[in-house]
Image: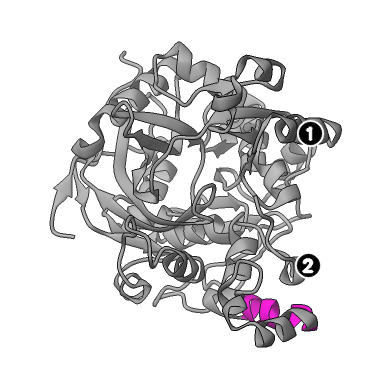
């Protein structure tokens, strides 16, 4: 539905998520601008317009951010953060500023609870939401030697950790390695946790995405299943498909309980993993902001971006009652790598990648906005041309090296794009190791009045 309003949406962030957001608003006829200095991936979009004024970035303090918003030539605007840092910053805006420039975020307290993985673990426990076992470094002695191999190290704050190491987590082998890794991370200034690894294939990961309005009503929610991921253990989805909400009913009920307890508002992306050992859906994280697969929501019939925009401006919005099942979203280059790596696995899913490339939304290419895909091609070509010559010679000497983790150009490209972050310096870096049916879409109320 096209909206005829002059109040703009301002997207804070770039890359895959920012591109999906500006496309959603552009298609709906909402004036949209991009704040920040980084315009990676989305600068070629037909709907890209930099926000006026001196640019700000993710490290901008609240006072400077308030001054920036007050300098804009708009009496009102709606703000959409597309990273944890932007979400935290916009959630901290004073009420006076937020009334004119309304961020689509939960309260600062709730955002901090969800972004900080230790606080999140405590919140899940407090609201009886099943989750993997979690320990602080001070508690590592309480984990038995045989059990320790079932844990991995993850950061309390994901974004700076991924920016530094290029991975989401570290596997550990034995107590000695665990203590050494914990000590080095502490020295580097990172707060981390030890989390139990839930065994299972990529298809065991389920996601609940949607929108909770300003009064606490869930206006939209759809379920999707991960079919493939890169890297396989601690990576991001490369191929996802929408599934009926009733297939993950226990996870939906748990999420409603958590949101009601926290008083959550805004867009959300919640990840669960089904634990075959006890049959429970265990919550892994909740992103309190737009997410990579935002265009999948629209493909499934849920325009959550314009829903949030209208709600922020005080316009009435309806609860979505259903969505399309079987719609797919793909990250093409990463998915080709994931498909190749899983080609001999009994747990492989999703079929040949080309099918998904042609049948649904993906990270960068769209028929009505094709130019951003050029950036992806350019970045991929840089990866190929800037690899060390000796690595290329090694590939020629060793035929199988072309498909190894350190030699496969698709793998290198997938690695540097895993974080939804990319810079020219990444190009020469080796990867770090480390439908016809319909489903119920929303209507749950967390804050009865």
Image quadrant in which the N terminus is located? bottom left
Q: Residues within 10 Å of mark 1 (few under 14, many from 20)?
A: few
Instruction: Please identify the residue farthest to the front as the structure is shown.
Output: 146
Instruction: Please name whichever residue, 251 or 13, is drawn nearer the observer in this view of the structure.
Output: 251
Q: Residue 330 appears at what percent x and percent y? A: 41, 64
Q: Residues within 10 Å of mark 2 (few under 14, many from 20)?
A: few
Q: Residue 18 appears at what percent x and percent y? A: 55, 56
Q: Main secondary structure of the magenta part?
A: helix
Q: Is residue 167 visible?
A: yes
Q: Residue 29 appears at what percent x and percent y? A: 41, 61
Instruction: Read off the magenta span.
Output: 378-389
Q: Which residue is mark 2?
A: 425
Image quadrant in which the C terminus is located? top left
Instruction: Please name whichever residue, 253 or 416, is drawn nearer the observer in this view of the structure.
Output: 416
Q: Which residue is mark 1?
A: 180
Q: Is residue 90 magenta?
A: no
């Amino acid at each position: 539905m096209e909206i005829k309003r002059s109040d703009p949406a301002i997207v804070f962030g770039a890359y895959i998520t920012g591109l999906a957001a500006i496309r959603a608003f552009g298609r709906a006829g909402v004036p949209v601008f991009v704040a920040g200095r980084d315009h990676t991936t989305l600068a070629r979009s037909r709907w890209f317009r930099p926000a006026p004024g001196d640019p700000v970035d993710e490290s901008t303090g609240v006072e400077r951010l308030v001054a920036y918003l007050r300098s804009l030539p708009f009496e009102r605007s709606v703000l959409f953060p597309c990273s944890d840092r932007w979400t935290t910053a916009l959630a901290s805006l004073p009420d006076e500023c937020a009334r004119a420039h309304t961020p689509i975020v939960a309260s600062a307290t709730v955002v901090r609870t969800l972004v900080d993985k230790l606080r999140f673990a405590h919140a899940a426990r407090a609201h009886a939401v099943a989750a993997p076992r979690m320990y602080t470094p001070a508690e590592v002695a309480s984990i038995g030697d045989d059990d320790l191999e079932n844990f991995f190290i993850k950061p309390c704050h994901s974004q700076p950790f991924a920016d530094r190491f290029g991975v989401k987590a570290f596997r550990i082998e034995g107590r000695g390695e665990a203590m050494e890794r914990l000590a080095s991370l502490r020295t580097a200034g990172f707060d981390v946790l030890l989390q139990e690894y839930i065994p299972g294939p990529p298809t065991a990961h389920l996601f609940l995405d949607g929108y909770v309005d300003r009064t606490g009503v869930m206006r939209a929610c759809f379920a999707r299943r991960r079919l493939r991921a890169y890297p396989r253990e601690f990576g991001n989805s490369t191929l996802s498909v929408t599934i009926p909400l009733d297939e993950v009913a226990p996870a939906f009920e748990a999420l409603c309980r958590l949101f009601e307890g926290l008083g959550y508002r805004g867009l959300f992306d919640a990840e669960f993993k089904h634990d075959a050992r006890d049959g429970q859906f265990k919550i892994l994280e909740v992103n309190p902001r737009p997410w990579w697969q935002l265009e999948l929501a629209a493909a499934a019939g849920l325009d959550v971006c314009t829903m949030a925009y209208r709600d922020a401006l005080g316009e009435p919005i309806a609860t979505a009652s259903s969505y399309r099942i079987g719609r797919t979203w793909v990250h093409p280059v990463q998915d080709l790598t994931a498909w190749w790596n899983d080609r001999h696995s009994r747990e492989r899913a999703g079929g040949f990648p080309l099918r998904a490339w042609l049948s649904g939304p993906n990270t960068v290419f769209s028929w009505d906005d094709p130019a951003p895909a050029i950036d992806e091609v350019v970045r991929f070509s840089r990866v190929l041309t800037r690899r060390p010559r000796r690595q290329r010679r090694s590939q020629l000497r060793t035929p199988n090296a072309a498909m190894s983790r350190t030699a496969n150009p698709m793998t290198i490209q997938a690695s540097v794009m895993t974080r939804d972050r990319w810079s020219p310096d990444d190009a020469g870096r080796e990867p770090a190791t480390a439908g016809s049916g319909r489903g119920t879409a929303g209507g749950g109320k967390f804050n009865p009045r």
